[in-house]
Amino acid sequence: MSTTFENAATQSVDVNGTNFVYREIGKKGGIPLVLLHHLTAVLDDWDPRVVDGLAAKHHVIVFDNRGVGGSGGSTPKTVEEMARDAVAFIGALGFRKVDLMGFSLGGFVSQAIAQQQPGLVRKIILAGTGPAGGEGIANVGAVLQDAFGKAGAANKHPKHFLFFTQTSNGQTAADGFLQRLKERTKDLDAPVSNETIQAQIAAIHAWGQGDATKLGTVQHPVLVVNGDDDVMVPSLNSFELARRLPNAQLSIFPDAGHGGIFQHHAAFVQQALAFLQQ
């Protein structure tokens, strides 16, 4: 298997008649770590430093859920359906127990998986995410629109505004992150479609109006991570997740936003590996 995410082959698996694309890295064996991604993201939007760092100790799998990027089918408009598709993908690869790392929308999906199929999951990392009904989550459409406007005016990438603080530290980290995403130059994933983005926004909006009561039943060990100034899923939601989950640890990175795990990738990988090893 590939030793770096940059060179990992894009593979596909049939999931109930639909092709799902994925990449895997790290030594096989043990409990694999499945990564679930954010709104608009495809395989190439994972920070290679994070994936490579995690794969130093774990078999790591990244995939495009239904309708996303190179995967077939239509993107569901609810988080719960996305979770069912992710469970089906995991089953198609033959895994009976996994660890999950969900970033942003992927964090919502990870929570839903843990509630739908608790026996499938050992441990969960929730980054830049929040509980159903969390503060500001339903505003994602307006936040996106604002960031795209600012990015156009400043001739910058929207992630400069969505994922990172506007301080010099934050913007330098944004430049570094976006540069790392360009390291892979071959066998690239397909971009997301407008239909997928609209379905994902609808799912996030519905999640933002949902109810987090059942989170108290999630007994899995959970590491909750975020920056201290997240404009996409306000950082208060990370504190709320840690409060509601019976077995949670909380890590908040300073002068960091939604992409805190990418800005502080070395520290995050160290924390994640320690958590998964416990």
Image (cartoon, rainbow, N blue to C red):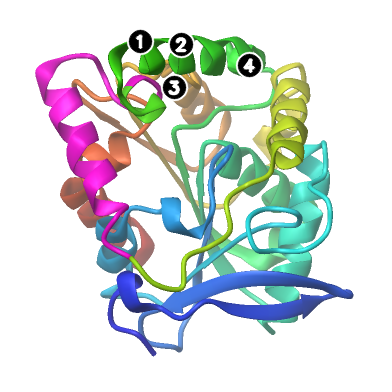
Amino acid, disc 2: Gly
Measure how far apart labels 2 and 3 are at the Cα level.
30 Å
Check whether the beta carbons of the residues at disc 1 and disc 3 lie within 8 A of each other: no
Q: Mark 1 points at which residue?
A: 153
Is tag 4's residue or tag 2's residue first in the polypeptide sequence? Answer: 4
Is label 2 or label 3 in front? 2
Amino acid, disc 4: Gly
Measure how far apart labels 1 and 3 are at the Cα level.
33 Å
Residue occupying image coordinates x 28% and y 42%: 178
Check whether the beta carbons of the residues at disc 4 and disc 2 lie within 8 A of each other: no
* Overall secondary structure of the magenta section: helix
Q: What stretch is highlighted in magenta?
A: 161-184
Q: Does the magenta stretch include residue 14?
A: no
Which numbered circle lies on residue 141? 4
Measure how far apart labels 1 and 4 are at the Cα level.
19 Å
Measure how far apart labels 4 and 2 are at the Cα level.
12 Å
Q: Name the residue under label 2.
A: 149
Is label 4 or label 2 in front? 2
Disc 4 element: helix
Q: Which quadrant of the structure image shows residue 60?
A: bottom left
Relative to 143, say whether 39 is above or below.
below
